[in-house]
Image: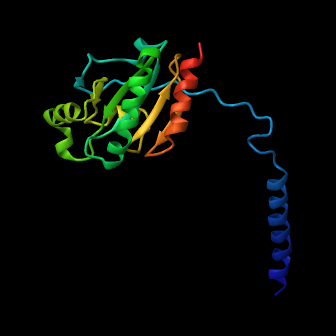
Amino acid sequence: MRTVRTYAIPLLLAVLGGAALLLAWPSADAGAQPLEAPMAPALAGGGPWHNSPPLELAQLRGKVVLVEFWTYSCINCLHVAPYVHQWHARYAGQGLQVIGVHTPEFGYERLTGNVRDALQRMDITWPVVQDNQYRIWNAWGNRFWPALYLVDRQGRVVYRHYGEGDYARTEAEIERQLALP
């Protein structure tokens, strides 16, 4: 019985002290400097490319780049597609470059002819790279269909969105990046 009391009181004090320390600890917002946005990984290792010769982000410096990870039979990707179309139509002339990274989920999505047919059916005219081996997907640390990454004019990933929705916020971030020199 004495052993329990001997350890119970210090344990209780340690727990209470830890809780008090956590409550007193400054939050991440309390004067913290924002971390610098990471440089965007390369688009290397995929292929073939559709609607364009192979591209590298280094050659697109000075443009804002929207990289979309998608696959043509993903229902969520199909729901996002009209918004990507609108952004491409609205902002390409202002310096936005959309690049699709088609990363298949199923075997039939790996077939180049099927991807080409889907691009035509969906009227996708911006560059799309097939990422059948998941090299680009893995380099970007991506885990979702669809996923949107916005790359600023210096090549840094400044915005991410996974899945559907939040279209107004994504568009606002596109506009904000295009407005920056």
The image quadrant that residue 93 belongs to is top left
Looking at this view, is 24 or 8 the one in front? Answer: 24
Looking at this view, is 152 or 57 the one in front? Answer: 152
In the rendered view, does 175 fall on the left or right side of 84?
right
x and y percentages locating residue 65 in the rendered image: 44, 23
x and y percentages locating residue 156 in the rendered image: 53, 23
User: Which scheme is used to colour this image of the protein?
Assistant: rainbow
In the rendered view, does 85 fall on the left or right side of 12?
left
Please tell me which residue is depicted at 56% across the width and 22% down the height of the picture: 177
x and y percentages locating residue 18 in the rendered image: 80, 59
Can residue 6 be seen here? Answer: yes
Indicate whether 152 appears above or below 15.
above
Q: Which quadrant of the rendered structure holds the C terminus?
A: top right
Can residue 42 be seen here? Answer: no
Please tell me which residue is depicted at 42% across the width and 39% down the height of the picture: 147
Please tell me which residue is depicted at 51% across the width and 36% down the height of the picture: 160
Looking at this view, is 35 or 102 the one in front? Answer: 102
The image quadrant that residue 49 belongs to is top left
Q: Residue furthest left?
A: 113
Indicate whether 101 appears above or below 29.
above
Q: Which quadrant of the rendered structure holds the N terminus?
A: bottom right
Indicate whether 114 appears above or below 98.
below
The image quadrant that residue 44 belongs to is top left
Please tell me which residue is depicted at 36% across the width and 47% down the height of the picture: 76
